[in-house]
Each structure stands twice: as C-alpha cells, then as structure tokens.
Image (spheres, helix red, strand yellow):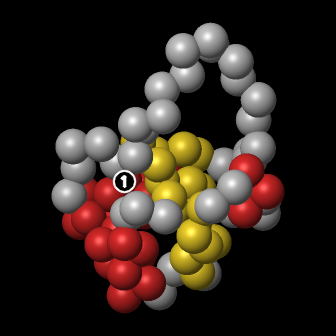
C-alpha cells in the first residue's frame, strides 16, 4: 500500500488513512517526507518568501477546510 506522510496535528486524518490500509508516516521534519508517495499538510505554515524546496516527488494535499473523509478521497484520487 502507498506510504502517506501526514502532518502531526492531523490525527483524525492519520487514523482515517490507517483504517483504509495506508502506511501513514507522521511528518515532524522535512526528512520524514522522503519516500512518501503523497503528503497531507494543514497549509497553516504559509510560504511568505516564496522559497520552493521540494522534499518529495509525490503529491502534496492541503487539508485546510477538508474533513478526514475528503482528504482520504483526495489521496486516493492522486495515487491512482
């Protein structure tokens, strides 16, 4: 199953993805995102300076305003 990195504060999303069988990695630092097929972030840390260093090759999903089920659907659609 796909490996999905999820920001620490999104515990409900982590649990929902685990329930669907995904290998969930808690993102505490940039190196945690390596080898992830997809990452889910809150989007609360805005990039004021516009610096774009990419840590993963997979999709990044912003969970701000989405329910855990909506995030799961987004993950599933991006990984197909």
Residue 55 is left or right of residue 24, and the answer is right
Tell me where residue 57 sits by quadrant: top right
Badge 1: residue crowd in 10 Å (few <14, some 14–19, many ≥20): some
**Residue 33 showing in the rendered view:** no
Frontmost residue, 39 versus 76: 39
Q: Give me the residue at 70% from left, 18% from top.
A: 51
Q: Give me the residue at 66% from left, 49% from top.
A: 58
Residue 36 to residue 64: above or below = below
Frontmost residue, 11 versus 16: 11
Q: Give me the residue at 58% from left, 46% from top.
A: 59
Q: For mark 1, what is the residue?
A: 74
Residue 61 is left or right of residue 39, and the answer is left
Q: Position of residue 41 (x, y in %)?
A: 47, 49
Residue 31 is left or right of residue 70, and the answer is right
Tell me where residue 47 sits by quadrant: top right
Image quadrant containing the N terminus = bottom right
Frontmost residue, 29 versus 77: 29
Q: Secondary structure at mark 1?
A: helix
Q: Position of residue 7 (x, y in %)?
A: 50, 58
Q: Position of residue 61 (x, y in %)?
A: 46, 45
Residue 15 is left or right of residue 68, and the answer is right
Residue 13 to residue 20: above or below = above
């Amino acid at each position: 199953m796909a490996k999905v990195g999820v920001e620490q504060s999104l515990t409900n999303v982590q649990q929902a993805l685990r329930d669907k069988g995904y290998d969930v990695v808690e993102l505490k630092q940039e190196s945690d995102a390596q080898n992830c097929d997809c990452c889910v972030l809150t989007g609360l840390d805005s990039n004021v300076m516009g610096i774009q260093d990419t840590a993963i090759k997979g999709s990044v999903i912003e969970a701000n305003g989405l329910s855990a089920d909506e995030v799961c659907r987004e993950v599933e659609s991006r990984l197909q």
